[in-house]
Amino acid sequence: MKKRFYIIIFLTIIIVSACVKDKTNHVFNELNEVTIEGMEDVYEGILGETLEIDPVIKTKFDDDSKLEYLWYVYNKVVYTADTLSRAKKLEMLVNGVTPGIDYWITLKVTNSETKVFAQKTVKFIPVSAYSKGTLLLCEEDGSAELNFLRIPQDRMYENLYASVNNGDLLNPNSSRVFSIDPNDRNPIAHKAVIISSNSANGGVYLNPVTFERTAYINEKFVVANQEPLLDIQHYCVSQTADYLIINGQFHNRENTYSGAEVSWLPKIIVRQEPSDYYLAPFSLHPGPGTPYAKPVLYDNLNNRFAHYDRGGALKFYNIDNPESAPFNPDNMGEGMQMVCAGYFDEASAMWALIKNINNNKFFIIRFDILVPPGGNWWDPAKFIPKAKIEITPDMAPNLIDAQEFESMSDIHVTSSYPWIIKPIGLSGRLIYLVNNKVYALNTNVGAGEFAEGMIIDGSAENLTIDRVKSHPIFEPTDDNPDNVYTRIDLCVKDLSLSGKQGGVVFYRTKVLGGLSVEEIYRKTGFCDKVIDIDEKFK
């Protein structure tokens, strides 16, 4: 009986439902969706200047009349967000932020009617005007001055030393500029810009952010340096320390992660005879491997390779059976001086250009420096001579008249695990300046295959080339975040100008189908002469 009752009720509901008219409105208002495009992932902002970000805002129906904009900034030290703007385009004066701390800028775009919103966050890195760029030591009206060039903005900051140091002038004998930046973890007190002047005080030590003078060179030693003249000739780093060659002598200091300034130690001594030495202004760093690996050096006075022993002295390489080796690194021969050195594809594989100053003959030597595995600093690295090849005039007819030499390879060293030591730049290549032309030579070919090639002709460009240098430039890409290209930097005089002629020209190198160069930047007429140039990467 109950089953029959439920069936009747069920049929009644179906009949009644069929008679009800559906009055539902099927017209919906689609949401005007918002997307944000045209913004980079990372922006740098220079303190005291305006950062502009102009996004592309798209809506589904191309109607932005109801959109509201909100820009805000925050960092991971203080999470409180600060509102920057409510305009579509951000125009922000960069102040109130701290260089060295990463910030994030967020744009939130909201439809005021539907409350649908989209947002995008980008990284923002505040920097000082002098954080990254090119250091230019220049001469004008007989005085030395320091300029700073930011190539992406085509912006030149002139006469910086005098302007931030109460009108003081650099020593007119100033000859070199160095960016001293051992590694990322060192505090700012460990970093500097150095201008060397071969004088009684040696030059000046500058704050790397403001360029204010913090000391004279002769004040930066743990024990006062008694040399009558100080000339800084070379700077290099290892994974645990950094080094200067001053007057041919080797000085070091250990890395520190405290805020204290670290001065340079007295010159490193030799505990064997002959105990005197005068180092060539070059260094090579063996690897890959232990963080205890130290630079490879060359003593031009006694014609021998050297290395810094962690015990506190310079030592020299001994090899088995030197009489049957291509050359003896502990006795290269009288008058054999190093004039250039660089790397092949592995950090353990190196080359050097040696000139016999007694007969003006040149030799390319190739060698490996094998660092013992396991990080035992008391185990000496092993020097393996590979080849010694004379570069005759028919191979490189202009080499004998070269005014200066430059390797096109360098070393990238990190100061923490996994202790990266790897060559960057162009393997086995060197360039040299002869009679206003730049020539290139590949050292990684067979004995009969050496041939120089001219890559830059200053006269054809109406330039006088005073100096040639090479810098590896990091240029990360999505496919290769470690991408590097080699840039050739020329210090020039522009003969097309009637007044100031000094300037710089930069070339990008290419190796596809042979070595070639492409001019990528030129700026002249801002001084009488560019004396020296160095790249300040951070």
Image (spheres, rainbow, N blue to C red):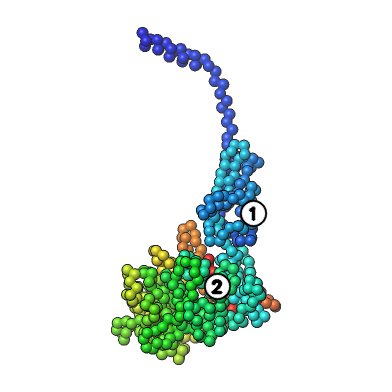
Of circles 2 and 1, the one toward us is: 2
| Viewer can see residue 472 | no
In this rendering, position of residue 137 left or right of residue 266: right
Task: Provide the residue designation for mark 2.
Answer: 193
Q: Residue at (61%, 53%) from the top-left corner?
A: 53
Q: Residue at (49%, 59%) from the top-left corner?
A: 477
Give the alpha-carbon distance from disc 2 to disc 1, as whole Å.
32 Å
Mark 2, secondary structure of its residue: strand
Q: Residue at (37%, 81%) from the top-left corner?
A: 315
Q: Position of residue 390 (x, y in %)?
A: 41, 84
Residue furthest out toward the right: 498
- Earlier sequence position, callout 2 versus callout 1: 1
In this rendering, position of residue 175 left or right of residue 382: right
Residue furthest out toward the left: 321
Mark 1, secondary structure of its residue: strand
- Identified by mark 1, the residue type is Glu
Q: Residue at (47%, 70%) from the top-left corner?
A: 182
Mark 1, Cα crowd under 10 Å, few <14 / some 14-19 / many 20+, is some
In this rendering, position of residue 223 left or right of residue 371: right
Q: Position of residue 171 (x, y in %)?
A: 60, 81
| Nearer the observer, 312 or 177 | 312
Task: Provide the residue designation for mark 1.
Answer: 91
Mark 2, Cα crowd under 10 Å, few <14 / some 14-19 / many 20+, is many
Residue furthest out toward the bottom: 358
Residue 358, compared with residue 265, is above or below; it is below
- Identified by mark 2, the residue type is Val
